[in-house]
Amino acid sequence: MDTSVHTALRDRSGVQEFTKRRVSEVPRAVPDVPPGEHYRPINPREGDKALANFLGLFSLGLGITQLVAPDVVTRLIGLHPTDRTRSTMRAFGVLLGVTALDVLGPRMIVNRTQPRPDGERGDNGHGPGAGGRAPTMYGQRYGAGRNRFSPERIPKDSGGRRVTNIITINRSIEEVYAFWRNFENLPRFMRHLVSVNETGSGRSHWTAMAPAGMTVEWDAEITEDRPNELISWRSLPGASVRNAGTVTFTKAPGNRGTEVRVDLEYRPPAGKLGAMVAMLFREEPGQQIHDDLRNFKQVLEIGEIVLSDATKRKGMHPAQPSNEPVEMKV
Amino acid sequence: MKANCWMGSKKVEVRNVPDPQILNQRDAIVKISSTAICGSDLHLYNGFVPTMESGDILGHEFMGEVVEVGREVKNLRKGDRVVVPFPIACGHCRSCEAGATSLCENSNPNAYVAETMMGGHSSCGMFGYSHMTGGFAGGQAEFARVPFADFGPLKVPADLTDEQVLFLSDILPTGYMGAEMCDIKPGDTIAVWGCGPVGQFAIASAFLLGAEKVIAIDNVPYRLQMAREKNGAITVNFDEVNSVPDVLKELTGGRGPDACIDAVGMEGNGHGLMFAYDRLKQMTKMQFDRPIALREAIMSCRNGGTVSVIGVYAGLIDRFPMGSVMNRSLRIMTGQCHVHRYMRPLLDRIQRGELDPTFVITHRMKLDDAPNGYDIFNRKHENCEKIVLSV
C-alpha cells in the first residue's frame, strides 16, 4: 500500500480532515486523476479552431469579393447585375465581412495557450506545494516521465491517432483483469477480431477482419503487465496497422465495480481522411473501442452480448424477425 | 405470423412476417394473447421519434403464454401465463440491481445511437420503440421474443382476466410511479395534466397514496368526464380558462398544488401564442417537443413542491422556466417507468380489489384492426381512451 500520496496530502495545511478520512489500510479506489490534480486532455482541443478559422476566412473572402466586385458575385448566383443588385450586394458584403472579423478577431488577437500533452509536471504553479511535489501515485503508476502524456510510441506528427475510452463494470477487479489478460477471450467482445493466440513470452498473434471479407494479421507483445492494475502492449515491427495501448483497471469509488480504461494509439491506414470515412461505418478504432468496452461489460455482467432484431445482422433492416441467419455473435 | 408494422408517418399495416427465434440464451418466446396501443406509440405514428424504419413491429404492452425458453431461463416453463414489462432489463448491472430497470446498462444494442442523442448516455432497450432503443420487434403481433425472460415477465394467476393485468406492462406502473414521485403527504392536492390512460392511472394512484384532492387538466370532454366519474377528480378544461396556473391557485387557497404530474409529454396541446410558437418550431424541426404542459406544471406548482414528469419527451425544448424552478425550490422527478419494481405490488393491489385498471378500456378490437385503432386513438374519435387488441 503506497503511502507517498498520503504524505503529500498531509503536508498541506487545511486538508488534514480529508486525509484522516481517506487514509486506511483497506484497498481503496485509485483514481486516474487523484484529488488535487488537474485534468489534462490526451487530445488537446483544436478541432473547432481549424473549422472556425476556415469559416471565418471563407466568409471574409466572400464578403470582400461582394464589396469590391459585386457584379461577379451577382452573376455567379444567376442574377442580372443592376444598380440595385450592386448596392444590395455591397451591403451584404459589409455585413458578411464584419461578421467574419467578429469570428476571426478573438482568435487572431488572443494567443491561446494550449495544454502541453508531453507530461511536463509543472503547471501554472498555482496552489501550494506545486513546485516541490512529492511523487504522486499518478506519476508513480506510469513512472517518471512515462505517464499517459509522455511522447507517444507512435509520434503524433506521423499521422498517429490517440483514442481513449472508459467504462465501469459491476464485477471485481480480479475477475475483470483475469478475463482481459487471457487474450484468447478478446474476440468474444472485440467483434472485429477473429482470434488471438498467445505464442509465449508475452507475445501474441492477432487476426482481425478487414473490409471486403479479408483478414489482417499481426504480432504484438506485452510491454507491461501488472496484475489487477494494467496491461500495456504494442504491435511488433512489420504490423500492418501499428498500434499500441494500455488497459488500466481501477476500483470504482464506493466499491461500485471496476473502471476499465483503454488508451489506444494507432496509425490509421488511410490517414485522417480514412479515419473519418471509417467513422461513417462505425469502423474507426475509437468507435470500435467504445463498442468493445460495452460488449466487455455485457459479457462479464450477463454472459452474452444481447442482440435485437435490428442488430442481429449488419446493415439496415427493420425491427422484425427474419429467416436470415444471425450474423452477429453473442 | 401477423404483426403490426410501422410503414411511415401515420401509416401502420398488419403484415405477415417470420416468427421470432431465440437469439440469446435468456430469451423466451411468448405467444401473445392481448396487447394494446399506447399514447407513446402515437409519437411513433405521428413521426416524432427519429430512427424508425419501415417494417418495424410496434407495441410494448403485451402478455401471453410462454411457448419456448432459452437454455438459461430457469424460472419459466412452456405454458406459463405472463405479462411482459416494456423496458428490457438484464438484472445484473448496477442500475437493475438498484431497481432502476429503465436505465439498464446492457439491454440496448444500439446504445451508441441513443448516446448521440442524449449526451453520451443511453437508457434501456425497449420493445417496439425505434432503433434508438435497440430495434427490438414489438408486441403488436402474434409472437414476441422476450430477452432476459428470467428477470422481466411476471407470472399472473389464472383467475384474473387479460384485461385486468395487461396494463401492468406499462401504463399502470407509469401512472403509479408518477404519483409516487410526488412524495404525497396526507392532505396534499395533486394536479395532473393529461387525462389519457396514464393520467387516469396517475389520478387513481394519487388517491391511493393519500392525496386529498386531485385536479385533472385536459381539453377533451369525454376524458375529463372519465376523470370525474371513475376517479373523483376535480376537472379543468384548459380551453375554457384563461390561465391554468391561476385556476389552480384559486382551487388551492392561493398556494398552488403540492405536486404537479405531467402525463402529457411532447405532443402537448394548448392555445394562444405559446402553443403557436411551439408548433412552428416543431414544424421547422427547430424543436422536437412541445412542452406546454410541462411549463404550466412548473409555473403552477407551489413553492417547494414537486413536478413529476411521466409524459414522454424525445429531445430538446425551448423556453424552459428555469428561473421559476430554481428560485422556488422546485423538485423535478422524472423517468421512463421502472416497471419491474411495481408489477408485483400493483398485482397484489388488483387481487385485493383496491384497483381495477379495466375502467380505461373503451375499445376492444382484433390485431387486424390495429391501423384503424391507431387512427381513432390518435384523433380521439369515438370517445377513445384505451384500445385493447386481442390476438
Image (cartoon, coloured by chain):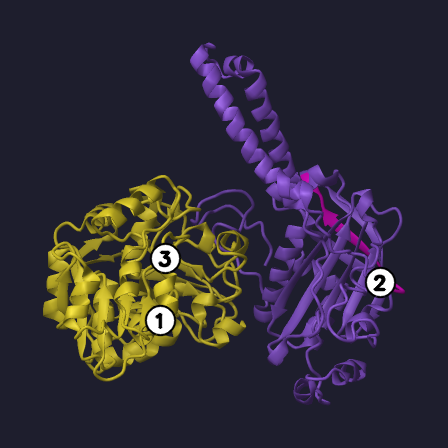
Query: Which amino acid type is shown beneath numbered disc 1?
Result: Leu
Region in magenta: A200-211
Task: Give the residue pinned by disc 1.
Answer: B330
**Chain A is shown in which shade?**
purple
The residue lying toward the viewer, choosing from B378 and B17, is B378
Q: Earlier in the sequence, mark 3 or mark 1?
A: 3
Is residue B34 among the parts visible in the rendering? yes
Q: Secondary structure at mark 3?
A: loop
Magenta run includes residue A277? no
Q: Amino acid at mark 2?
A: Ile
Q: CA distance from mark 3 to mark 1?
A: 13 Å
State the residue in front, A12 or B127.
A12
Above-or-below relation of A33 to B384: below
Return the residue at label 3.
B320
Disc 1 and disc 2 on one polypeptide chain: no
- What is the secondary structure assignment of the residue under circle 1? loop
Other-residue count near label 1 (Cα within 10 Å), few / some / many at <14 / 14–19 / ≥20? some
Estimate how packed mark 2 is, as few (under 14), some (14 to 19) or many (20 or more) residues with alpha carbons within 10 Å.
some
- Residue, x 61% and y 70% (percent of image)? A169
Which lettered chain is shown in yellow? B
Q: Are marks 3 and 1 in contact (CB under 8 Å)?
A: no
Q: Which mark is residue A222?
A: 2
